[in-house]
């Protein structure tokens, strides 16, 4: 029996996925959580074989959760189930050791197949998303530029960002300017939007 932990903030979707997986004779959902910051404790408590993560969750996004699980040396394989089919997400997920990437609009049996494959040590990637990621190329942004764009996107003022990151305000503006140039966008709002659309932040 392959044990599964589900993390998705949409209760209806999480319940439907759990019900569908429950129809599979070799899969058992042992825990469900609705927030990203609840995943680590649930993994520690239930020790699932596979953890299925949504990307867009309160508390902590699914990609950050995957990165933390990898850092903590969690035994479980990780599969991402998402409606956000952005090329940058796939690249970041792969870097975090995620083995499966399935779109929420995929046929019902696809997630079960993905869970079996990643549990067996293989990879399961949505074909269209993989093709898009290859076509999009590498993320041009540095970690610091991504961090600043994420904070800008959350409505944080430049002075506050400078304080949070222990940088001078001018340095923050320089990082922002460089990011805008790399993304070919005229202002910070457009830069944040473009980076989000590519899944780079």
Image: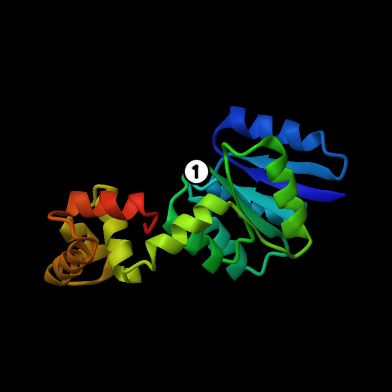
Q: Which residue is mark 1?
A: 57
Residue 68 position, x and y percent, is 56, 63
Q: Residue at x 19, y 64 (%)?
A: 176
Q: Compared to 112, does 188 lie above or below?
A: below
Between 113 and 145, the one lying in front of the other is: 113
* Callout 1 crowding tier (Cα within 10 Å): few <14, some 14–19, many ≥20: some
87 displayed left or right of 173: right
Q: Secondary structure at mark 1?
A: loop
43 displayed left or right of 138: right
Between 55 and 136, the one lying in front of the other is: 136
Q: Compared to 103, does 137 lie above or below?
A: below
Locate the C terminus and report the quarter of the image it occupies: bottom left
User: Does any portion of residue 194 appear in the rendered image?
Assistant: yes
Residue 20 position, x and y percent, is 74, 33
Between 148 and 120, the one lying in front of the other is: 120
Residue 180 position, x and y percent, is 19, 61
Q: Residue at x 72, y 54 (%)?
A: 50
């Amino acid at each position: 029996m392959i044990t599964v932990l589900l993390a998705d903030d949409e209760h209806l979707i999480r319940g439907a996925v759990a019900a569908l997986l429950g129809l599979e004779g070799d899969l058992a959902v042992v825990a469900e959580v609705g927030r990203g910051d609840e995943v680590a404790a649930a993994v520690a408590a239930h020790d699932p074989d596979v953890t299925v993560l949504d990307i867009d969750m309160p508390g902590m996004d699914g990609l950050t959760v995957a990165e933390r699980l990898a850092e903590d040396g969690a035994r479980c394989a990780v599969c991402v189930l998402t409606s956000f089919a952005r090329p940058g997400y796939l690249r970041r997920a792969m870097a975090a050791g995620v083995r499966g990437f399935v779109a929420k609009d995929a046929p019902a049996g696809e997630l079960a197949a993905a869970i079996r494959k990643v549990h067996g040590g293989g990879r399961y990637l949505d074909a269209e998303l993989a093709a898009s990621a290859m076509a999009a190329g590498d993320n041009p942004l540095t970690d610091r530029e991504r961090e600043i764009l994420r904070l800008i996107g959350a409505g944080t003022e430049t002075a506050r960002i400078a304080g949070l990151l222990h940088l001078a305000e001018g340095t923050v503006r320089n990082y922002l300017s460089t990011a805008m140039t790399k993304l070919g966008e005229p202002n910070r709002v457009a830069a944040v939007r473009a980076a989000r659309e590519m899944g780079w932040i």
